Amino acid sequence: MVQPDTVIEIRELRRTFGATTALDGVSLTAPAGKVLGLLGPNGAGKTTLVRILATLLAPTAGTARVLGCDVIKDAAPLRSMIGLTGQVATVDELLTGRENLEMIAGLYHMPRSRARHRAAGLLEQFGLTDAAGRRCGTYSGGMRRRLDLAASLIASPPVVFLDEPTTGLDPASRLAMWAAVEQLADAGTTVLLTTQYLEEADRLAHHIAVIDHGRLIAEGSPGELKADLRGDLVEFHVTDPAQRDRAVQAIVPLGRATAGTGRESQRVTLPAPAGAATLRTALRLLDDAGIAIDDATLRRPTLNEVFLALTGHPGTRDDGSGPAAAGNSPVTARSTR
Amino acid sequence: MTAQTAAAKAAAPLTFRSTGPLTFLTDTGIITVRNVRRMVRTPQMLYFASIQPVIFIIVFRYVFGGAIRTPGYTYANYLLPGLLVEATLFGATTAVALATDLSGGLVDRFRSLPVARPAVLVARTFADFGRTTVVVAVVLAVGSLVGFRFNNGALAGAAAIGLVLAFAYAYSWLLAIIGLIVKDAETAQLAGTLPILIFIFASSLAVPVGTMPGWLQAFARNQPVSVTMNAVRALTQGGPAAHSAWPSLAWTAGLLVVLIPAATALYRRR
């Protein structure tokens, strides 16, 4: 049943574009005041879902409610209670930062004095006060995205949709964006955040929904996802890459290990259902075989590995190298350190 | 369910006059101001929009003028009413500006806000109407330099200008539809210019329709651009003014009645 504090409620949502199915029956709920991370690769259906929730797109089938408002029937009242930051910064490059914010405030029908005050506060919060009087065409990419986020927060909406808010941002701007999202959550705003970045979902989201090919394939807290799908892992690096295959052979009694390839040719990863005991045994077996290692660790799987296990292909890494650049054996994704 | 409604109610104080009869006017005003700011801040757009008709005036008046006979009119008085209409249509930017906002995502932002639905389109056509009046002023100023005169009184002259502005405004709604369909500035530029070329050149713009072959005459005489040019000619130079003005007004009204709901429906589609 619907919990009293359910803010986003999606049931069997489908959306097709011609022959393409962007959303294939997604059901999902989000509680109030939490960050829901929607994690998936390009083309998974994340943006379609956000556009439906933001009343920009009609579902082909199914229902979606935000704050109790149906996104089709109650779109008009809903629009004054949501904020949307899309994948590209939708600021007017010929207007100044301040003009952009005051225009959006006006369209939320805020009183002018209040709009001016709120715009000044947000410009301050996002470090744009000095640039407030400059046209946005002169802003850096990071500044535009910050202004875009400020615009979607101007009316203090109780629900905010952020569609890949950090894609293409430099590290400093990304950190600033993360801090802003954390601040929103602290203030009790319900945030739906889409991302291809596993680290981002891991860091910001209270609850993660993984979608791929328009389907919800897993759901849970970051910890639950990691714990449910894979146990701990033992990972070590052999000193001599030539010894790697022998190392894999040596630990066969413990299970099937995975060897890294390419730049990771010294790495071996092994499922460790028994935790520290597995690590201890592995080290003894390697010692017996006379194989020197540089290091050995017992660790949780990364979300990237979880993602691979769920979707059959790796997620996008934070450093911008795509799935094709991963240089792995097909069995295990590279860890993200 | 009730709990959800309660959540929506709890959020309600955060909204500000989200609906009401004045919302549409407020929203249209805010977005029009934004559109006009953009225009003023890209003055080169206005310069070129003004230079183009000036070039047309000079080319037709002095290059072709000697070879074209317009019984009953000096060539300047024959040509300028046509160019007045041509200039407002040829350089119209509604499709390009709307497509730019659509592809840039700004229209999506407006759509996600509690903005009265047709406000974005109305604000677009209002801003372009401002641009049209600048173009009309430029054409009249340059026209007077090359010999154009109002020969039928101030009232009829003002009516002629009103007719031009009204027709151009109706036409901007056609461009709005093109912009909404193509959603890309370059395509919008082409799609908005090519069709109007036919209406501009297969018209009474620069040569009397009577010199054209019969099959073309029927089109060139009755199509809306010609009808409006003839009305402006009659209103500024004398002649059967009322007889010409009504068909133009009918076209303008007809276009608005069909195009505004069509554009609004396209904008609402999601």
Image (spheres, coloured by chain):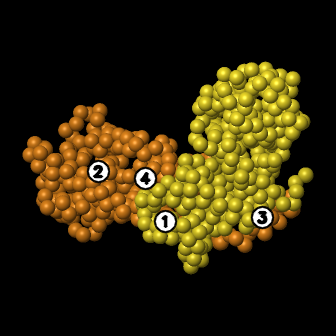
> Which residue is tagged 3?
B8
> Which residue is tagged 1?
A97
Q: Residue at (14%, 61%) from the top-left corner?
A: B145
Chain with colour orange in the figure: B
Q: Residues within 10 Å of mark 2 (few under 14, many from 20)?
A: many
- Image location (x, y in percent) of residue B210: 21, 40
Q: Residue at (54%, 67%) from the top-left corner?
A: A127
| Three-letter amino acid code of the residue under disc 2 | Glu
| Three-letter amino acid code of the residue under disc 4 | Ala
Q: Chain of mark 4?
A: B
- Image location (x, y in percent) of residue A297: 77, 39
Q: Residue at (81%, 32%) from the top-left corner?
A: A283
SS at mark 2? helix
Q: Is residue B22 visible?
A: no
Disc 2 versus disc 4: nearer the observer = 4
Q: Is residue A247 visible?
A: yes
> Which residue is tagged 2?
B86
Q: Nearer the viewer, residue A213 or A224?
A: A224
Sequence-wise first label, 2 or 4: 2
Q: Residues within 10 Å of mark 1 (few under 14, many from 20)?
A: many
> Which residue is tagged 4?
B97
Q: Chain of mark 2?
A: B
| Three-letter amino acid code of the residue under disc 1 | Gly
In which quadrant is the C terminus of chain A drawn? top right
Tell me if A264 is positioned left or right of B250 in this view.
right
SS at mark 1? helix
- What is the C-alpha distance between the residues marked 2 and 3? 53 Å
Q: Nearer the viewer, residue B131 or A66?
A: A66
- Image location (x, y in percent) of residue B91: 32, 51
Chain with colour yellow in the figure: A
- What is the C-alpha distance between the residues marked 4 and 3? 36 Å
